[in-house]
Image: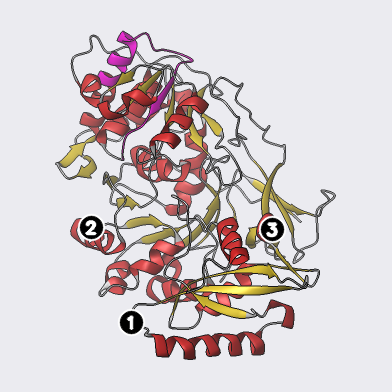
């Protein structure tokens, strides 16, 4: 099935294009957007030090650009930014763009080995980081203090074509070394037309994103969309615990909150969570399949103010959204203009509505990852199909359901099983916090399913045995026989990567070795 959405009406929130600027530079577009709409003295960011205006953000970016230029950085240079979310990161990112360099933001909490690997992959000409990271890189390290001082005259915005690379994001590296996906100076406006418009960020909003700016998704949430659209954004250097996040939402009157399903589930275990989340104008959930039980609970609190979105690092943000105006329960909504999608079989032929297949995408911002920063950035043509690793279906009205990664499929008795379907059923039990299902092979060669379950706080050992029997009984009465777990193992937590995604390979390895039983 191939789906192409109608193009929505015009949006005058921000200047239409980098083509409207003198230089074609994204950093100039963001500054001119604030200036043209009279926002320079409005609050752009809020952090532990107070409020910071759009003017101070862009003036700080100019000082960073001056420092970069003084160190010989310019068009084509790569700048690795290894800083936590904060004003220093924003200014370094915009300053790099201003001189025509490519900004590559990396997780500042990486283990030293991972950080060194990121440096080898990015091959930067300079690194922006704190002094203690200096020994991890061969490139010179510039500290935030050096970027905020008097580095000389502020250089003009480097002239850039729409296809000039502006920044790059690392993939999560769940199937090997991370790759770099490059995005251009023109991509931000396309992402804003799609995901930014779906979220509907305005000058009246206060935003907070749990996903950090080293992810393409977090970068859009905390930098691109609010700077284009004039919203205020709360920044925290560390990723908050769920209870701390709830307190922050209440303290700052956050209206747009972005997070992953697991984080929302953990927030809901705390007193007052429903009241705080219920004040949001929109709650955006992404990063993994949203369990049905959690969607029901969030819909009860938020209704269509819950926006479930789908995207990839290669795209740059989201291209599917299920929320106000285009909502259908338990789907990811429809594709957002100007993107297109289709669902194909193993031979690459489009399938009929309702038939499961592989999700393929087309659009103007898709940049498949490359192994090294010095590699020629890959870009798909706007009409060229990019193949994901996700299994999906689309109904006749174009509402898409993503079932999970194709390599997440478990095989039981020669039959393909999507674990998310079973996990959804298990998580409907009020005592279950999280669940993961995988197949195990016994010594006799027979495969069966095993469920790993995290119980909610307060469920004691005696009650847990009752929960186990109830889960198995429910599975037997509501699922086809080959989807019923053979047993349920209670665990204290499930393995997840730094993005919050479930590490299914680790779950399988633990199941095979029996190391998760306790």
First in residue order: circle 1 vs circle 2: 2
* Disc 1 to disc 3: CB gap under 8 Å: no
Residue 121: % across, % down? 52, 27
User: Which residue is denoted by mark 1 in the rendering?
Assistant: 458
Residue closer to the observer: 84 or 225 = 84
Mark 3 to mark 2: distance in Å? Answer: 36 Å
Say which element carries label 3.
strand
- Whether residue 130 is visible: no
Q: Which residues are magenta?
A: 63-84
Mark 1 to mark 3: distance in Å? Answer: 36 Å
Question: Badge 1, how many Cα within 10 Å: few under 14, some, many 20+?
Answer: few
Residue 399, relative to residue 239: is it above or below? Answer: below
Magenta-drawn stretch contains 136: no
* Residue most extreme to the front: 443
Which label sits on residue 391?
Answer: 3
User: Which residue is denoted by mark 2 in the rendering?
Assistant: 248
Between marks 1 and 3 in the image, the one whose residue lies nearer the viewer: 1
Residue closer to the observer: 421 or 341 = 421
First in residue order: circle 3 vs circle 2: 2
Residue 308: % across, % down? 50, 60
Q: Residue at x 57, y 37 (%)?
A: 177
Relative horizontal placement of residue 507, taking residue 81 as reference (left or right): right
Relative horizontal placement of residue 3, taking residue 97 as reference (left or right): right
Q: Residue at x 81, y 69 (%)?
A: 414
């Amino acid at each position: 099935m191939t789906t192409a959405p109608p193009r929505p009406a015009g949006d005058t929130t921000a200047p239409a294009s980098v083509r409207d600027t003198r230089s074609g530079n994204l950093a100039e577009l963001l500054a001119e957007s604030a200036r043209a709409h009279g926002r320079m003295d409005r609050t752009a960011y809020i952090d532990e030090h107070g409020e910071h205006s759009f003017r101070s953000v862009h003036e700080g970016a100019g000082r960073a650009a001056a420092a970069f230029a003084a160190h010989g950085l310019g068009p084509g240079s790569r700048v690795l930014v290894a800083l936590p979310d904060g004003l220093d990161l924003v200014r370094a990112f915009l300053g790099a763009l201003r001189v025509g360099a490519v900004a590559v933001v990396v997780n500042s909490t990486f283990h030293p080995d991972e950080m060194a690997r990121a440096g080898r992959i990015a091959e930067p000409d300079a690194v922006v980081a704190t002094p203690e990271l200096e020994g991890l890189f061969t490139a010179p390290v510039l500290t935030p203090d050096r970027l905020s001082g008097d580095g000389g005259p502020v250089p003009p915005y480097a002239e850039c074509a729409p296809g000039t690379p502006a920044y790059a994001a690392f993939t999560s590296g769940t199937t090997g070394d991370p790759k770099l996906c490059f995005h251009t100076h023109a991509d931000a406006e396309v992402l804003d037309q799609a995901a930014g418009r779906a979220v509907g960020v305005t000058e009246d909003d206060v935003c907070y994103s749990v996903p950090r700016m080293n992810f393409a998704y977090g970068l859009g949430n905390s930098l691109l969309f609010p700077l284009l659209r004039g919203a205020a954004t709360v920044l925290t250097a560390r990723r908050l615990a769920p209870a701390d996040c709830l307190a922050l939402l209440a303290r700052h009157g956050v209206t747009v909150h972005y997070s992953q399903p697991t984080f929302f589930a953990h927030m809901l275990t705390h007193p007052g969570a429903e009241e705080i989340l219920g004040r949001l104008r929109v709650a955006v959930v992404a990063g993994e399949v949203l369990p049905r039980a959690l969607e029901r609970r969030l819909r009860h609190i938020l209704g269509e103010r819950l926006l479930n979105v789908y995207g990839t690092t290669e795209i740059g943000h989201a291209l599917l959204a299920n929320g106000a105006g285009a909502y259908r329960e338990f789907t990811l909504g429809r594709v957002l203009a100007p993107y297109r999608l289709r669902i194909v079989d193993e031979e690459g032929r489009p399938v009929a509505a309702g038939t499961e297949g592989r999700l393929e995408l087309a659009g103007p911002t898709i940049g498949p990852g490359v192994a090294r920063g010095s590699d020629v950035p890959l870009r798909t043509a706007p009409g060229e199909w990019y193949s994901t690793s996700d299994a999906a279906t689309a109904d006749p009205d174009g509402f898409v359901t993503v079932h999970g990664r194709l390599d997440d499929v478990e095989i039981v008795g020669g039959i393909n099983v999507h674990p998310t379907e079973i996990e959804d059923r298990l998580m409907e039990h009020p005592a279950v916090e999280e669940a993961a299902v995988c197949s195990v092979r016994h010594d006799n060669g027979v495969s069966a399913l095993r469920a790993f379950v995290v119980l909610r706080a307060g469920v004691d050992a005696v009650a847990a045995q009752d929960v186990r029997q109830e889960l198995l009984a429910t599975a037997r009465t509501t699922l086809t026989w080959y989807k019923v777990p053979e047993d349920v193992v209670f665990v204290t937590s499930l393995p997840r990567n730094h993005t919050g995604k479930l590490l299914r390979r680790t779950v399988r390895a633990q199941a095979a070795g029996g190391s998760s039983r306790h």
